[in-house]
Image (spheres, grey):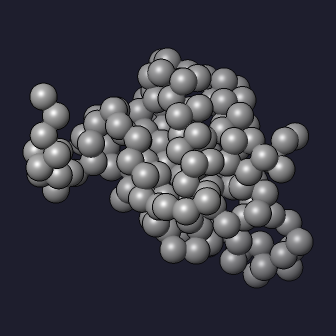
């Protein structure tokens, strides 16, 4: 039985597991949800994913396979990393260069984020290294990006 009040109580304790949570409305929300659902369809063992606004660091949509993982919290730190790398490019005199992708490797996980061509948002995912390799994650990410911003076709 689905009781809306109980669902709201669960969200107070953290992100809902195995559920796409949209934090935005408007014309872009369908494309954002479509991008996250594509990641889930192609990477069923996905640990967490998010679509994040770079300027604010706010997640526009999130997914987590485990309530202990907090993609909304990680999103803000990843957005700050993107802003810092952009600032470093300006400081070194190469402002025409654009960040396309960032990879964080952990002993058991891969964390990959890819900026949309507009540079306004990025798609982020985390996978277990035993389940997915970097090549597969990158290819799935390209597909998610095409759903987010159709002009992203490469």
Q: Nearer the viewer, residue 130 or 9?
A: 9
Q: Which of 4 and 94 is in front in this view?
A: 4
Q: Which residue lies furthest to the top in this view?
A: 131
In the rendered structure, the answer to whether residue 140 lies left or right of residue 107 reads right
Give the quadrant of residue 139: top right
Residue shown at 48%/42% (left/top)? 49
Give the tally of numbered discs.
Answer: 0
Residue 89 higher or lower than 49, as above or below: below
Residue 44 percent coordinates (x, y): 47, 21
Residue shown at 16%/46% (left/top)? 4
Q: Nearer the viewer, residue 46 or 84?
A: 46
Residue 3 percent coordinates (x, y): 13, 40
Residue 76 higher or lower than 127, as above or below: below
Q: Is residue 106 visible?
A: no
Residue 108 higher or lower than 154, as above or below: above
In the rendered structure, the answer to whether residue 52 lies left or right of residue 74 reads right
Residue 122 percent coordinates (x, y): 62, 55
Quadrant holding the C terminus: top right
Residue shown at 46%/29% (left/top)? 46
Residue 150 higher or lower than 138, as above or below: below
In the rendered structure, the answer to whether residue 97 lies left or right of residue 108 reads right
Residue 111 percent coordinates (x, y): 53, 41
Quadrant holding the N terminus: top left
Q: Is residue 27 visible?
A: yes
Residue shown at 84%/75% (left/top)? 95
In the rendered structure, the answer to whether residue 101 lies left or right of residue 54 reads right
């Amino acid at each position: 039985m689905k009781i809306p009040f109980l669902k709201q109580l669960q969200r107070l304790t953290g992100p809902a597991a195995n559920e796409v949570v949209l934090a935005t409305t408007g014309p872009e929300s369908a494309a954002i949800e479509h991008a996250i659902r594509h990641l889930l369809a192609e990477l069923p063992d996905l640990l967490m994913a998010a679509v994040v606004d770079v300027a604010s660091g706010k997640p526009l949509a999130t997914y987590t396979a485990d309530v202990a993982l907090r993609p909304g919290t990680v999103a803000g730190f990843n957005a700050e990393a993107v802003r810092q790398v952009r600032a470093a490019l300006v400081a070194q005199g190469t402002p025409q260069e654009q960040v396309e992708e960032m990879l964080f490797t952990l002993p058991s996980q891969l964390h990959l984020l890819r900026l949309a061509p507009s540079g306004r948002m990025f798609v982020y995912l985390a996978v277990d290294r035993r389940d997915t390799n970097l090549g597969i994650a990158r290819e799935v990410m390209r597909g998610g990006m095409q759903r987010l911003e159709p002009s992203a076709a490469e």
